[in-house]
Image (cartoon, helix red, strand yellow):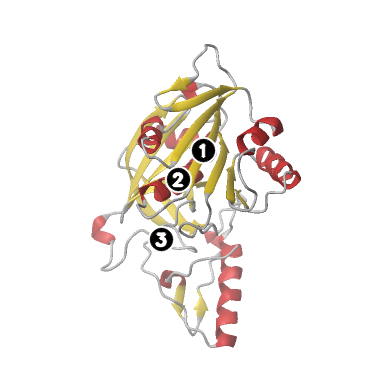
Amino acid sequence: MSLHNDHNDYNNEDDGPKMPLEEDCCGSGCTPCVFDVYKILLKEWESRKIQDVKVKTSSNLLSLLSYKTFIIKDISETSEDYFLVHLEYPEHKIKKDVSLHFIPGQYVMLHAKCKSRPYTPIVWTNKDLVLLVKLYNQGEFSSYLKEASVGSTIDIRGPYGNFKYENNSFQQIVMFSIGSGIAALYPIAKAIVDDETELTRVYLVAGFQSVAHVPLKKELRHLVDFWNFKCTLQLSQLNDKISSFHGFNIKAGRLNKSLVADYLQSNSTETTLILICGTSEFNQSMREWLQEMNYRHVHIFE
């Protein structure tokens, strides 16, 4: 893991990163844990000291090592079992020249009730962000977020994630997601589509249980209006003969090796970037299938 240094995480460059306190670790197995982040920052700082390279201070409102308290501004349903949480940092606490910064695909750690969970913002501004949350039947954290009151607070640290995309570096990007994995891929697709200088074609294949379970329909409809974006919804439960839905292609069945090969059959292994986000089992299966197909440019969000 590589991290983008933030001046908030250092006493000063000469002293290195701030060591977290024992109570800063919630003990719930966060990935990354604040102590893991500290070790990485310390190693990077030691390397810079040897090379006599100064840290590039950042103006990011967020911190990698400590939590910042955000206010819940809104909670709204986006589909069956999925909802959106809109969080905002109090404006009176924002220092001059400091704002929220994300690279599309990065995630944050949310902390509440002695538990922490990772979530990927789908959109953000200089002081607020929106998270896509899947509600699990036995999920304590997702249930807590669903029942939280507007105006209540939640703690956030980050951002984390080392994916970087260079403008026009591939002819096409094929994205495979299942369930809430779409949260990592949607902001990347949007950033590419919104860039008028981009010639890269983006193809999103998103797996869900049914049409009713597809979140971000409005947001995806906006993207399919662009020449360089298309989307197929791969539905495990398709009870009718619908083959299209407001600009989306719809196919029945779970994503498997044969379907993945079909989606990729016309793409060059040299000029295609493949992005993947889903369950650990799905990610591992995709990794194995793509290796067999000789695709080298693959990034998995885990």
Instruction: Residue 230 in the image: state x and y as whole percent.
Output: 46, 36
In the displayed image of the protein, which residue is found farthest to the top? 240
Task: List the residue tagged with mark 2.
Answer: 189
Asked if residue 92 lies left or right of residue 175, the reply is left
Q: Identify whether 75 is placed above or below 111.
A: above
Identify which amino acid the numbered label 3 is placed on.
Leu
Q: Nearer the viewer, mark 3 or mark 2?
A: 2
Whether residue 104 can be seen here: yes
In the displayed image of the protein, which residue is found farthest to the left? 92
In the displayed image of the protein, which residue is found farthest to the right? 292
Task: List the residue tagged with mark 3.
Answer: 62
Residue at mark 1 to residue at mark 2: CA–CA distance: 8 Å
Sequence-first disc among 1 and 2: 2
Q: Which of marks 1 and 3 is in front?
A: 1
Residue occupying the point 70% across, 34% down: 257
Q: Give the image quarter of residue 276.
A: top right
Q: Give the image quarter of residue 227.
A: top left
